[in-house]
Each structure stands twice: as structure tokens, then as C-alpha cells.
Image: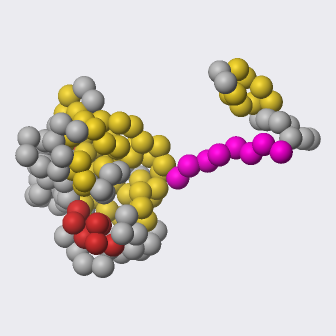
Amino acid sequence: MVRKPLVIVNGLIEQLQAGDTIQTCDFIGVALSNGEAATNLVIGMPVYCSSFANAKRGQANALATSSIIGLWGDDSTVPTNIGTCIITGMVTAIAAQWDVVTGAVGGLVAGTLYYLDPLTPGMLTATAPSIVGHYVEPIGYALTTTQMRLLIGLPVLL
């Protein structure tokens, strides 16, 4: 059976026309303001929504700060400026950018699941938290040294 998908063109729904293609993307992002007082948000940094349309660095030491909505998608965003938060899909950054948010050298480790760090705001760790009172918050799975597939889960209190 041959089916034609429906698309929106100039605000109207119609069938996909012969010769047209559907554009796909690697991620979905939302525009948020950097809600930090004195810290730039950088690519790959886990963030939570601190208030309406404001993002702050996440940390797995409290429920509010471990409720991650996504990873920051822009190179660097100064406080009060608007940037992109990637909420689903693939996050791609160069190895040195991942090093900033993992504290490692050489980028992500392919095949590794990353978690929200309980000790340092805005950081990821390859080791799941294990201290009572911290939250285990899976963030994403590294496919390569530069690509992470987001798998943001619900924070679980230890």
C-alpha cells in the first residue's frame, strides 16, 4: 500500500507532493534564558528550568536541581541572554567542549552512559551517584567522542 504523508504548507494541511521531501533534524531544542547570575552556560551543560523560561546548571544533590530538561546547545551564553536547550535527540560537540562538562580529556567515551554530577553544578559524570541523599539522573549515552544521544530520565533519590 502506498501512502502519502500529510504536511503543513503555508498553514494549510496537504499531501506531500511528488518530488518533495520531509526534512528531519537530529534534535529538538527550546529557547531559554541563562538564569545564572555570573556563569555562562556552555554546550553540553545539563540544565533545569529554574523559573519560567530560565535555565540554570543542574546538580544531582537536590530534587529541584536534578530535574534536568536538557543539555545546553550553544557554545557559550552569558547570563540573561537567550540560548538553545536541547531537550531530545542528539547533542554534538567537539571533544574539548565535552571535556569542559565531563572533566575528562579526549571527549566522551563511546558506549558510556553519563549521569548528572552530584558534586559540581553543570557537570556530567560517567559514574552513577552512590551517596545517600544524592539523585541518580541518567542524561545520555555516548555514541562517539563527540556525540551523545539524550536519555534523560527521572531523578531517583538514593
Residue occupying the far right of the picture: 1
Describe residue 26's horizontal placement relative to residue 145 as left or right.
right
Q: Is residue 136 magenta?
A: no
Q: Main secondary structure of the magenta part?
A: loop
Residue 102: percent from left, percent from top: 23, 66
Describe residue 66's horizontal placement relative to residue 132 as left or right.
right
Residue at x 32%, y 51% (from the top left corner): 74
Residue at x 78%, y 42% (from the top left corner): 20
Of 26 and 20, the residue lying toward us: 20
Residue 9: percent from left, percent from top: 70, 27
* Quadrant in the rendering for residue 124: bottom left
Q: Is residue 23 magenta?
A: yes
Answer whether residue 93 is visible to the viewer in this image.
yes
Residue occupying the far left of the picture: 38
* Quadrant in the rendering for residue 62: top left
* 139, above or below 95, in the image: above
Residue occupying the far top of the picture: 12
Describe residue 148's horizontal placement relative to residue 98 as left or right.
right
Residue 148: percent from left, percent from top: 41, 62
Answer whether residue 67 is visible to the viewer in this image.
no
* Quadrant in the rendering for residue 19: top right
The residue range painted magenta reads: 19-26
Q: Give the quarter of the figure containing the N terminus.
A: top right
